[in-house]
Amino acid sequence: MVFSSAIFLFFFLPAILLLDRCIKGQKAKNALLLTASLIFYAFGQPAYLALLLVSVGLNFGCGLLAAGRRRKVGVALAVTGNLALLSVFKYTDFVLATVNQAFGLSLPLSGIALPIGISFFTFQGLSYVIDVYRDRTLASRSFSKVLLYISFFPQLIAGPIVKYHDIAHEIDNRTATPEGTALGIRRFICGLAKKLLLSNAVGQMADAVFALPAGGIGAFAAWTGAICYTLQIYFDFSGYSDMAIGLGRMFGFHFRENFNYPYTATTIKEFWRKWHISLSTWFRDYLYIPLGGNRKGAARTWANRFLVFFLTGLWHGASWNFVLWGLWHGLFSVLEDCGAIPADKLRGKWYGRLYTMLVVVLGFVLFRADTLPQAGAMLAAMFTGGTAWLGTATVCSFLTPAFVFSLIFALILCAPVVKRFEEKWGKWSFAGALALLLLCMLNLSAGTFNPFIYFRF
């Protein structure tokens, strides 16, 4: 695994931040951040540091080709090479298991361990080569700069996916101001609090419900577990994104937002403009639009959408659960687009929000379940009344005052309450962040930290 939370918070991060402020010159600062990033990755999986370097080397070389006379060759090699690496290390056992199940075979699985963050750094590498292909002036002749872009530790293992053209200028020209550092620290603390105080709390309920046997769960427990997981994954992933954005700001980088209160969306299409923005825009810019987007008729548009959502699900994990989760969202996106679901009448309405959250919650059952049969059992339990109260004892065992407090805050903070507070009471928000940090330290001292969900993607 990566650094423990205590080592990262109290030793690694302060040391790197202090050295960054003491060192003069952009080249020296870049060298510091690059060294820190490689140490950070090697601490978790030293055997796969070589894989990261090979991946970056591939994209650096393809970038040079894409900036020269053999531009299409560079892009073709980048796509082929990156997808080959991703397929071998992430999908080999998935393919073998699928073949075994389909044909009744017993092919041995490879047992290849999943490299941390491979989905993220693979997409960033592809982003670099494609950006260079589209604009030769973006090409870098420095391997170390490309390596820093792809391996920068705040967003290396769980995003957000940063496009090269967004930070190319800041690699060579950035300024870490006291104000920017303070804002970055506040953002980092808020993200940490999301994870420790909200996501972990509701996640315990979700884990307990999903651990129940198929015959031991009723409607009440199933809905409770599904809703808690919907809150857990949002505060877990948006919390990490906040931490990455805050860390970047401390060092002078400005990463784009990755979440924009997605649970306030009133259509599925709007949800995906607010959820995991770096991934949805990546697929839009580098796949959907190049395939023709919505410019080649309705049938082609819907096919493109289904392909994008299929790959979105597959990107998240080597399991049919993730694929079906992606196609589930693709189905409702197409239904809204073709008018079968009247998106125009749903936008901005409370019943639009209810519809969207129903689709999202049911989809996350597919996402969270370990197997398709478990997902089927959970979904069946949510809509059957005969065994409605099975599992209620498990749910009630978690209903402590601390859990209820966390649940209420989680529900409130799905709306832009904090954003409005910052706008109106900016100075007081720093005092609030300090209080949150103290609570987080108490939480960490209790040893209740759990890995981020997106570490496994």
Image (cartoon, rainbow, N blue to C red):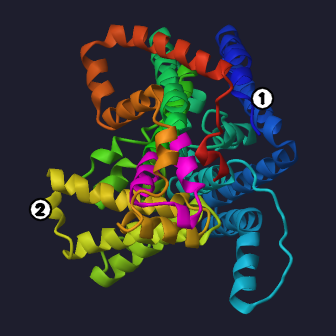
Name the residue carrying label 1: 35
Q: Nearer the viewer, residue 123 or 12?
A: 12
Residue type (three-letter) at the residue carrying disc 2? Lys
Residue at image position (47%, 16%) is: 180
Residue at image position (17%, 56%) is: 351
Q: Nearer the viewer, residue 203 or 380?
A: 380
Mark 1 or mark 2: whose residue is earlier in sequence: 1
Whether residues under marks 1 and 2 lie with C-beta atoms below 8 angstroms apart, the answer is no
Q: Nearer the viewer, residue 336 or 84?
A: 336
The local secondary structure at tag 2 comes to: helix
Residue 5, visible in the rendered structure: yes
Residue 402: percent from left, percent from top: 47, 26
- What stretch of residues is rendered in magenta? 204-228
Q: Is residue 313 left or right of residue 126?
A: left
Name the residue carrying label 2: 345
For the N terminus, the quadrant is top right
Q: Is residue 67 magenta?
A: no
